[in-house]
Image (cartoon, helix red, strand yellow):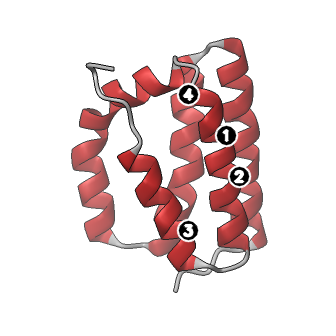
Amino acid sequence: MLSLTEADLQAMRGANVRFEAAIDEGDVDAALQADDDLHGVPVAAAANRALIAVLDQFTPVLRRVERLRFSSTDARASVARHDELIRLCAHRDSNQAAAVAFDTFHSLPTSEE
């Protein structure tokens, strides 16, 4: 099980504050950076080279879809998803945290939406 420190959780919370501000300002690039920073915390803590390799491979593919989401009205829902993910990580509920991450990736808009 992944154990995040209080500093890790604070970094995630701070990234979500920056993410929300970027969404409110319509700054998709800043939202993407904050989102990367938030999700990068548990990825770094996991220290799983295979996971990092997969994310490095597929992040460029996901960028277009993330840009669509973060420039849409659905962007605000990501703030709540992040809050829930952070809450679950703080409670060390890895199964539910994984479920939130799974649901997030499966709710990404397609370019046809």
Upstream in sequence: badge 4 or badge 2: 4
Amino acid tagged 3 = Ala
The residue beneath circle 1 is: 79
Closer to the observer: label 4 or label 1?
Answer: 4
Tell me if 66 is positioned left or right of 82 in this view: left
Disc 4 packing (10 Å; few <14; some 14–19; many ≥20)? few
The residue beneath circle 2 is: 83
Residue 78 position (above or below residue 109): below
Amino acid tagged 1 = Val
The residue beneath circle 3 is: 97
Residue 78 position (above or below residue 8): above
Q: Helix, strand or loop at disc 4?
A: loop
Upstream in sequence: badge 3 or badge 2: 2
Mark 1 touches mark 2? (CB < 8 Å): yes
Towards the viewer: 69 or 6: 69
Residue 41 position (above or below residue 14): below
Q: Helix, strand or loop at disc 3?
A: helix
Amino acid tagged 4 = Asp
Amino acid tagged 2 = Asp
The residue beneath circle 4 is: 74
> Quarter-wise, where is residue 34 in the image?
top right
User: Which residue is drawn at the image coordinates 27% and 34% (left, top)?
Assistant: 60
Examine the rendering and report whether any part of residue 44 can be seen: no
Mark 3 touches mark 1? (CB < 8 Å): no
